[in-house]
Amino acid sequence: MKKTLNINIGNSIIHIEEDAYEMLTIYLNEVKQHFAKNADDFEIVTDIENRIAEMFVEILTNQQRQVINIQDVQGVIAQMGSVKDFESSEEEEETEEYVAPPHFSVKKLYRDTDQAMIAGVCSGLSHYLDVESRLVRLIAIATIFLGGSGILAYVVLWIMIPRAVTKAEKMAMRGEEANLKGFANSYLQPLVQQSRGFIAEFLDVLGNFINGTGKVIFKIIAAGIIAFGSLIILCLIVILAALLGMWDSNIYQMFPLNIINQDYVTASTVAVFLVFVIPVLALVLFSIRVAFNSRPINKSLSFGLLIIWLAGVAVTSFYVVKIGSEFKEGAEFTQVSEIKPYQTYTLSIDRTRFFTKEDSLRYSIDPGNYSGRRILADLDHNFDAPRNIRLNIEKGENGKTSLSQYYKARGKTFEMALKNAQNIHYDFMQLDSLLTFSPMLQFVKTGNWRGQEVELTLKVPVGTKLNISKDFSRYLDGYGYWDCDHDSNSEFTVWKMTDTGIKCEHEETSNNGE
């Protein structure tokens, strides 16, 4: 059993055996004594310690061990070189001019930010390819004119290539040996820093800001994202629970939920929930990491969330395409009704609701209890479908009055579209000069919304007056209906059919008075 120690070398905590620690201490003391006469002795020794720490970490990681032994120290010293060997080589080169250090045949690719104009990509490539940086920059500029591909390539390399930060990384970038001689020569012949330009200086200022004040701002923003994202997740969970919990209610007969077939409701609802909630959850987890400097998200968790999200996207896409295919074809049929002629007609909305046999069973409607009564539709809360009733008023021919009803719907095939159109029930009734229209269409049999609509065309002779209920404002498009509302106490607006079309009688009177 050997005694172990915890040491801090190169800002890394290393577990090391006692005899290995003694050997390492002797070696570092020799290094410090040798470079004590150098003006950059502290920087050189610090870089050497950082390199030794990196080598120790590599050994422990590769060999899955926790403690450095004496054999490891001996191996590191052999790679770094002993002080005696370094001194003897210095004596041999005292009378000779400085010769650039030998290069490895294999270099490491880093971004050289010391010679960077923007991010150091071109200067890093120049070291790796052993060519002048000016040539690499010239080629990079030329590729910009190839459809902008050079910019995209530069950004990708910026992201993928790491920056040379430590002295050892900068030496590896240039192909220099990371040993005592290499560190010493690196300081004797440092890499000359070039003028970097406005962009590089701006990036430096921006980086310093992000490392300082920017961190505080980012943490505040991250805290806001966490709070807002958590609220969104809670709302999505409540909506999911409400939708799945209301399976037997009438909520699925309301637009837009009545677009979805009942067989698809559960799967499609859960899939859409996953598509929206997982990105928000990922953003919240990332914000927690930024705000509290926590450890990265577990890779297994991240991969699992990605798989679930992709599955949700796939299922959602499947049902969107499947439901969308049921709107492929369109069909319509027309029903024309003759209307008894009158000089003046009154157009009103009849709020009496039509009930099928299924509706009577669903709402437990007993004809005996509702004898002489009417069940009215709520116009203010009509979510059964989008605005699917339109009324057009046109000039009649041959002095006749008629109402054309166009029933339209869509389906996967023409036959299905026609069945959907035939499933529409719409009420219209004439009582003398009173024309009553239903405010909504109904389905004879339970069905999903497939673009069902009813377009009404009322044709009246020239000179006919129309008292139109203000409830028609949502069904009349392009007539400037509210411009004709000159009496707030009246329930109707007064119109008149002319040779050029229907006109507000108030406007006609004003024009004649002029």
Image (cartoon, rainbow, N blue to C red):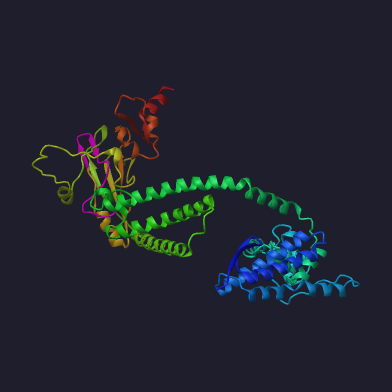
* Up-down relation of residue 510 to residue 380 (above or below): above
The one nearer the camera, 128 or 508, is: 128
| Position of residue 379 in the picture relative to residue 39 (left or right) | left
The one nearer the camera, 9 or 482, is: 9
Q: Which residues are magenta?
A: 428-448
Quadrant assignment, res 140: bottom right
The percent coordinates of residue 474 (x first, y second) are 34, 38
Quadrant assignment, res 401: top left
The percent coordinates of residue 87 (x first, y second) are 82, 72
Residue ranking furthest to the left: 368
Residue at image coords 36%, 51%? 237
Q: Is residue 442 found inside the magenta-colored segment of the image?
A: yes
The answer to whether residue 468 of the structure is visible from this angle is yes
The percent coordinates of residue 46 (x first, y second) are 72, 61
Residue ranking furthest to the right: 95
Q: Is residue 10 found inside the magenta-colored segment of the image?
A: no
